[in-house]
Amino acid sequence: MKDKFGRKIDYLRLSITDRCNLRCIYCHNGEFEKVEPSSVISYEEIFALVSHLKNKGLRAVKITGGEPLLRKDITYCIEKLVEMDLEVSLTTNGTLLNEKAAELYEAGLRRINIGIDCLEKSLFSKLTGADLYQKAVDGLNKSLEVGFDPVKINVVLIKGLNEEIDPWLKLAAEKEVCIRFIEVMPFVNGHKPVRCNEIKTRLKEMGKIKEISIQGRGPAEYFKVEGFRGTFGFISPVSSSFCSDCSRLRLNAQGQLRSCLFSPKTFNIRKVLRVDYSKEKLDSLIEEVLAKKPIDNKGLEPVENMCQIGG
Ligand code: SAM
């Protein structure tokens, strides 16, 4: 698949639920209207869409949400997507991983991203609105024990809130994890990011660093510090633009396809799959989505919370 600017599109961010058991302050803007259960895209509809997209060149799927591990039978979903011979990865807040990591691995999942923004219990509760710090840490440890590789930890640092870098440096010194610092995008409350360059400067003080490559599809740059077991990644949506390399489409939990995180325009794929199906109709809707993919996100404002769009 190509968009009208010639970018190759081969990656789908697949949100399977808008529900979440956390209320991260940069992700949730108060309560929002949840998708009615009858309007949630079914797994069978997802498989039909993914199979169609695969024939058009799709190579990778990231399962997201909301919190994807809240959705029933997630293991079945993963098993089927893995069977389709796609790169499958999952992003989760980790709080349910202690119970689910082994079955997810068994289903064929190998790559996992865990979002944890601080390593201190009371600050975690303040940032997430939930007292689930230990659950998240247990989930992280379980995923390492089960054998996921890579285990990436997504860390969103916000000025004046959770600015501390050193606990993450210590963690990567000791464990085989990839700590990925993500600059907060000011979707909610105008939060200011701790800039990736600031963190890189601190990293350089830790020893000799070299740029490396790590399996993945995102716009991250990766580094290793000599002597550390883990690695570091940097995703800088605020400091730099990576729209020119964007290869993504996004499907939200109600089966609406979007060509850009910031785009207000969605296309109702679920309706075509559920009510009005023909291969030609599906194809023409997908072509329309590709044609409408913006060149970049300048001048666009996200119209929904990240957990509704699918992070
Ligand atoms: N619940 C899952 C999780 O925690 O990974 C999946 C959904 S969450 C929306 C996916 C990712 O989006 C998280 O790693 C989170 O850090 C990131 N995210 C959400 N809002 C963000 C924002 N405003 N700026 C940067 N990253 C954001």
Image (cartoon, grey):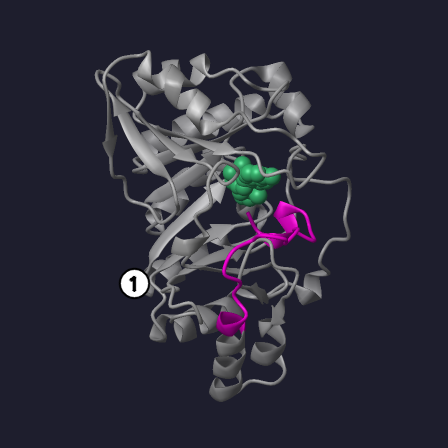
Percent of width and height locating residue 163? 55, 18
- Which residue corresponds to the image point at 49% horizontal and 36% vertical from the top-left? 239
Which segment did they paint magenta? 289-311
**Residue kind at label 1, given as amino acid type:** Asp
Residue at the spot 77% in from the left edge and 53% down from the top edge = 33
Q: Quadrant of residue 256?
A: bottom right
* Label 1: how many Cα within 10 Å (few below 14, some 14–19, many 20+): few
Looking at the image, which residue is at 46% across and 73% down?
48
The quadrant where ligand 1 appears is top right
- Residue 43, horizontal then vertical, whole percent: 52, 65
Q: Which residue is mark 1?
A: 85
What element does badge 1 sit on?
Answer: loop
- Which residue is nearer to you in this view: 156 or 300? 300
Q: Residue lying farthest front?
A: 299
203 in the magenta segment: no
Does residue 207 appear to the left or right of 2 in the view shown? left
Quarter residue 162 falls in: top right
Residue 38 or residue 208, whichever sits in front: 208
Decide whether residue 296 is among the magenta residues.
yes
Tell me the quadrant of the picture where the N terminus can be found. Answer: bottom left
SS majority, magenta = loop
User: At 55% from the left edge and 70% from the top edge, which residue is drawn?
Assistant: 292
Q: Position of residue 185 (x, y in %)?
A: 59, 39
